[in-house]
Image (spheres, rainbow, N blue to C red):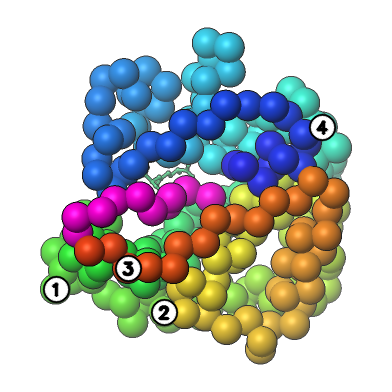
């Protein structure tokens, strides 16, 4: 979200929400985010939640050049869905297991520590990376033209190294990352380098 706001040069005020410490579990936050999840925005009294809904909303309101026109709009929605499903169920939780303790990751994902299937997450991440490499080997952008789908998917791909992934074997995916990083206004994601101890909570889980 920070990245898209920077790319479209839209001023905003940011508030950090510490979800690992469950600071999101309040009725006040629910008024902005129905599921009490980050990210969510308050645009002069209009609450918009879910990263994909926010990207679409901001692009429609301020930056229509980031919306793929027909027929590519179908691919844009498909890749937004990949971000919400395949990435959210592979690379995103895999990274979590590396940047916080396994106990915290399991707690955040709503499973017992014994059921935290890191190998399963690695397998799903591997499939995701292969699909992305295949797509980006034939198209510079996920929806053929540059769109909010690239930004949605980039968030956790930018942090792949934090999930213990080396993208050396994925040249098309790496070139796509570099294309995004060369866009005017680009800001790098905030990296998390230390494991949580259980006492200190400050990891920014949303991109
Ligand atoms: N589909 C939502 C998912 C958001 C989501 O899962 N947010 C997580 C952090 S990355 C969260 O707020 N978790 C806290 C909780 O569920 O209590 C989106 O893409 O914005």
Corner quadrant of residue 122? bottom left
The stretch of residues the image draws in magenta is 198-207
Residue nearest the observer in this picture, 95 or 140: 95
Tell me if label 2 and label 1 are in contact, CB under 8 Å. no
Q: Residues within 10 Å of mark 4 (few under 14, many from 20)?
A: some
- Between marks 4 and 2, how big is the CA–CA gap? 36 Å
Q: Secondary structure at mark 3?
A: loop
The residue carrying mark 2 is 122
Is tag 1's residue or tag 3's residue first in the polypeptide sequence? 1
- The residue located at (30%, 34%) in the rendering is 24
* CA distance separating discs 1 and 3: 19 Å
Q: Which residue is mark 3?
A: 195
Does 89 appear above or below 147?
below
Asked which quadrant contains residue 90, the reply is: bottom left
Is residue 76 in sight in this rendering?
no
Residue 75 place in picture, x, y as percent? 72, 53
Query: Who comes first in sequence, dot 1 or dot 4?
Result: 4
Residue behind mark 1: 114
Answer left or right for 180 relative to 129.
right
Q: Residue at x 85, y 49 (%)?
A: 184
Q: Secondary structure at mark 1?
A: helix
In which quadrant is the N terminus drawn?
top right
Q: Residue at x 38, y 37 (%)?
A: 17
Q: Are marks 1 and 3 in contact (CB under 8 Å)?
A: no
Horizontal and vertical percent position of residue 175: 79, 73
Mark on residue 59?
none
Name the side, left or right, on which 116 lies relative to 54: left
Q: Tell me the SS state at disc 4.
A: helix
Disc 4 + disc 3, Cβ < 8 Å? no
Marked residue nearer the N-terminal end (4 or 3): 4
Tell me if residue 202 is in the magenta stretch.
Answer: yes
């Amino acid at each position: 979200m920070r990245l898209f706001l920077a790319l479209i040069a839209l001023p905003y005020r940011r508030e950090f929400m510490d979800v690992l410490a469950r600071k999101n579990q309040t009725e006040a936050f629910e008024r902005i985010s129905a599921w009490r999840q980050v990210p969510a925005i308050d645009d002069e009294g209009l609450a918009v939640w879910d990263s994909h809904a926010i990207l679409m909303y901001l692009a429609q309101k301020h930056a229509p050049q980031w919306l793929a026109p027909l027929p590519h709009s179908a691919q844009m929605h498909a890749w937004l869905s990949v971000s919400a499903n395949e990435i959210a169920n592979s690379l995103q939780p895999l990274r979590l297991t590396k940047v916080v303790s396994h106990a915290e990751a399991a707690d955040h994902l709503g499973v017992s520590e014994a059921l935290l299937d890191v190998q399963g997450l690695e397998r799903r991440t591997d499939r995701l990376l292969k699909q992305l490499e295949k797509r980006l080997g034939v198209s510079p952008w996920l929806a053929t033209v540059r769109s909010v789908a690239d930004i949605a998917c980039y968030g956790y791909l930018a942090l792949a190294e934090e999930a213990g992934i080396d993208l050396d074997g994925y040249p098309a995916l790496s070139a796509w990352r570099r294309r995004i990083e060369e866009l005017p206004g680009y800001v790098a994601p905030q990296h998390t380098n230390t494991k949580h101890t259980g006492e200190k909570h400050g990891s920014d889980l949303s991109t």
